[in-house]
Image: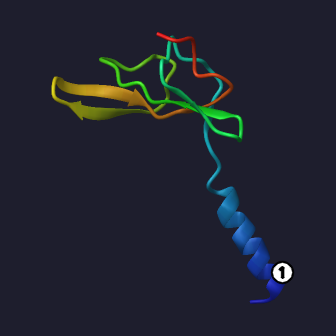
Amino acid sequence: MGIFAAVAKENAVVESKAIDINPGQLKCCTNCNFSFSGLYTCDDVKKDCDPVCKKCVAVKTYSGNKFRCTDTFLGICGPKC
């Protein structure tokens, strides 16, 4: 494999790991985390998942299962709860 083919292959691998950005905004988020890239994530654990959230994961707590939205947002997650 030539050097140009290796670089092209490496670029293709990087491009396949693109972040899926949620264009919406959560109803509320108390723990909105900012990264220097301008992307935000919400670390709130709630009784149910916000309808705007595309990917919600179950989180085990002492009081039973709750949910965390694992979406990435461009701009703020939502107003504080």
Judge left or right: residue 45 versus residue 14: left
Judge left or right: residue 28 versus residue 73: left
Residue type (three-letter) at the residue carrying disc 1: Phe
Q: Residue furthest right?
A: 4
Mark 1 Cα-neighbour bin, 10 Å: few <14, some 14–19, many ≥20: few
Q: How is the image coloured?
A: rainbow
Q: For residue 3, what is the image quadrant?
A: bottom right
Residue 11, x across and y down, in percent: 74, 66
Residue 70, x across and y down, in percent: 47, 35
Figure check: 5 above or below 48: below
- Which residue corresponds to the image point at 23% horizontal and 34% vertical from the top-left? 60
- Which residue corresponds to the image point at 44% horizontal and 17% vertical from the top-left? 50
Nearest the viewer among 55 and 70 is: 70
Q: Quadrant of the N terminus?
A: bottom right
Figure check: 24 above or below 34: above
* Residue with the mark numbered 1: 4
Q: Residue furthest bottom?
A: 1
Residue 43, x across and y down, in percent: 45, 30
- Which residue corresponds to the image point at 50% horizontal and 13% vertical from the top-left? 28
Kind of element beneath mark 1: helix
- Which residue corresponds to the image point at 75% horizontal and 80% vertical from the top-left? 6
Judge left or right: residue 11 versus residue 53: right
